[in-house]
Amino acid sequence: MQIDIIETTGLGDRSYLISSEGIGIVVDPQRDIDRVLKLAADRGAQVSTVVETHLHNDYVTGGLELARTTGADYVVPAGDSVQYERVPAADGDVIRTGPMRLRVLHTPGHTHHHVSYVLTDADGVVQAVFTGGSMLYGATGRTDLLGPEHTDSLTHAQFHSVRRLAAELPPGTPVFPTHGFGSFCSATPTTGTSSTVGEQARANPALTQDERSFVDQLIAGLSAYPAYYAHMGPANAAGPPPVDLSRPRSVDGAELARRIGDGEWVVDLRTRTAFAHGHLPGTLNFEQSTNFLTYLGWLYDWGAPLTLVGGTEEDVAEARRELVRIGIDRLAGAAVGSPEELAAGSPLGSYEVRDFAGLAATVAHRPVQILDARRNDERASGGVRGSQHIRIHELPARIDEVPDGEVWVYCGSGYRAAIAASMLARAGRTPVLVDGSYDDPEHGAAAAGLHDPA
């Protein structure tokens, strides 16, 4: 049996293709199924079974469309109420696909009906376990996505689910989770890119702590998660429509100016330094990198017209692919070109980019308004002395709390600060982007003498 990993780094998730003797099983596929189909073709495998460990809260599944496209069975946890035909997966069920077997284990915690799939050969010898949002690498899936009224009971359930996996599977069993590679679905940061059940027995808090300690620490450590999560579960229960990766309608400079003037979402995909050097005033900067989808999805006014501005057609196509993964299917359009070309003679906006040393030098000579756009858990260990703390996802509603004039803005890496700077510029402030890692031992805040411990 061969197990291929399909990474979706922008969401911190993995999907899997299991293949043997020309037959394939797909676990937790993302929305853009062309990646799965190409991999299956490369492996010479016909997808016959598609399985979900749970109704996902961080992305729109491609499972239903993949099953319909390939004629495969679509397996979804039995307890979940869905609006399409599926093969229900209940505890103890065995799914037979060619020489492969999947034994279903009910492992609630991330959701009530979450299951894990134990892969065996036809003789019942365990080959691997696919744990979704249950046992992760050095962590577990978060337990608060279904509402605060469920968090305590789901956290207790998560503890017992991970312990069940450890008790019922051989120590050498490879563990293949869906979440945990930067995903906000992980309760705490994960470690490593591979592991076994035996290794988790020594590293996973559900297996190294008593139940009360595990529950208390997990709940105490839960931080904010992206607002778009609220739309994912309902979309997956209803059954997502077929994916559309076609190019958005072209928009020229005059139309861009009108949309910006109307206050619509016009998003520039270029790097934060390129955007700061020159951009169409009123646009927002979500640099197309690993964090693009998480933060655009988090801050976006769901359902509002969204226009993309990219330097190349490839930039727009990649952003389009990312966005359909969270159900942003209908874009108002896209423009390709440099800011100078798209501005058609109108003046561009710009602002300074500095580092923490530059901030320290400025603070030494004059008063400076400073904004910290990090999360609460980051701020808990301290921040730049005298800085105002507004988390990036709160800034749209709290931007009036930021004083007029010049504002230096920082975060943990520069990515969120760049988004905040573009928002401040659109609101009439004069941002200065502090671009750099807060914790960099040589160039970060502490090295510049700016860090104020909590």
Image (tube, rainbow, N blue to C red):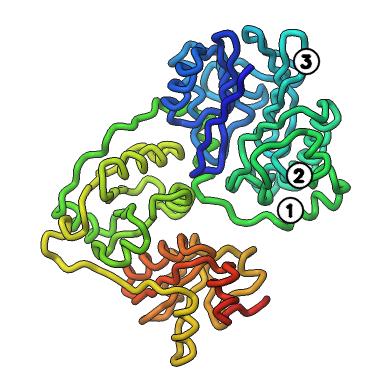
Label 2 sits on a secondary structure element that is: helix
Residue type beneath disc 1: Ile
Give me the residue at 57% from left, 30% from top: 5
Q: Residue 42: percent from the left, percent from the top? A: 46, 18
Local crowd size for mark 3, using a 10 Å CA cut-off: few (<14), some (14–19), many (≥20): few
Label placed on residue 155: 2
In this view of the protein, can residue 291 be seen by the observer? yes
Give me the residue at 81% from left, 49% from top: 214
Compare residues 291 and 267 and report the one nearer the observer: 291
Numbered disc in front, either 2 or 3: 3
User: Does residue 373 lie above or below 60 as drawn?
Assistant: below
Badge 2 vs badge 1, beta-carbon distance below 8 Å: yes
User: Does residue 82 lie above or below 389 as drawn?
Assistant: above
2 horizontally vs 277: left or right: right
Residue type beneath disc 3: Val
Residue annotated with mark 3: 125
Compare residues 330 and 439 and report the one nearer the observer: 439
The quadrant holding residue 80 is top right
Numbered disc in front, either 3 or 1: 3
93 horizontally vs 7: left or right: right
Quarter of the C terminus within the rendering: bottom right
Say whether disc 2 or disc 1 marks the residue closer to the N-terminus: 2
Residue type beneath disc 2: Thr
Residue at the left extreme, as displayed: 345
Residue annotated with mark 1: 219
